[in-house]
Amino acid sequence: MEAGRFGISEERLRRLASIYECDSPALIDALATMTGRRPAGWWDDYRGKIPPDFLEVSELEHHATSLRTLQTAHLPGMFQTEDHARALFDLFIPALPRLEIELRIAHRLARHQVLTSEPAVPYKGLIHESALRMQVGGSHVTKTQLKRLLEESERDNVTLLVIPFSIGGFPMAGDSVLYAAAHSPHLDTVQVDSPIGAVYFDSPTQLSNFRRRLDTVEQVALNPTQSRNAILAIVEEL
């Protein structure tokens, strides 16, 4: 069962939870909902066509109760425009096949639906100024992309916070982090990008440390209004 080769019934799961003296009803209920056969997600259409890491991230976002991200070099994937995403994928070495690029773009654009579904998932994104100023695809593509960020920041469930150059160093500088909260805190997951693929963290100590780090960065970031003004100022420079 731990390897995922066999499933488990809800009844057996609850019995095991009792044997293990689990004292968190929320955790038990959350695990129980995972015992049933889950319907296929929209990301399953891309299985075998793009890297598994892409599918795991979109599934993680889909099942999250809230999302927090930190981006220091790139803009959040679910807000990227088609032209911006294409310019990023065109930078890969060795070059990706054209069909795979188009599939990756389509998948990335589809991730946005987690913010528009009912109920919409609360999202808070920390974006460093360097990511905003990097002209991926040229000034026109960048300008259009930043205007998209401004539009998205007006959603009730979306909060975008800019980390300005002026604050200097901060925890996790240089990292790309996704913190996906679950129905029970025990099932929260952190995903960090690395040169060899996504790395996941889920132990209580690791989760606590990531929450503290994100909280610290949030405290030094601009507030939502200041952040929108900062993005608008960069748009006007282009």
Image: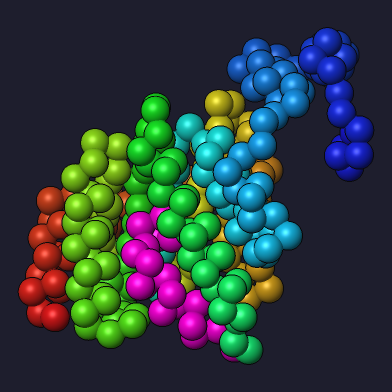
- Name the quadrant of the N terminus: top right
Task: Name the residue at 64% across, 55% down.
Answer: 46
Q: Is residue 32 left or right of residue 58?
A: right
Q: Is residue 194 visible?
A: yes
Q: Is residue 191 above or below residue 73?
A: above
Q: Is residue 220 above or below residue 140?
A: above
Q: Is residue 66 left or right of residue 236?
A: right
Q: Residue furthest front?
A: 99
- Name the quadrant of the C terminus: bottom left
Q: Is residue 166 visible?
A: no
Q: Is residue 50 left or right of residue 65?
A: right
**Residue 7, position as x, y percentages in the image:** 87, 28
- Taking depth in this image into account, of 120 and 106 the one nearest to the observer is 106
Task: Name the residue at 64% across, 50% down.
Answer: 45
**Residue 84, position as x, y percentages in the image:** 36, 72
**Residue 214, position as x, y percentages in the image:** 42, 51
Residue 237 lies in the magenta stretch? no
Q: Is residue 6 left or right of residue 145?
A: right
Residue 86 lies in the magenta stretch? yes
Color encoding of the figure? rainbow
Task: Name the residue at 20% across, 52% down.
Answer: 151
Task: Name the residue at 49% across, 85% down.
Answer: 91
Q: Magenta segment, which residues?
A: 75-93
Count of numbered labels shown in the rendering: 0
**Residue 140, position as x, y percentages in the image:** 21, 79
* Residue 40 figure quarter: top right
Q: Residue furthest bottom?
A: 94
Q: Is residue 12 above or below residue 221?
A: above
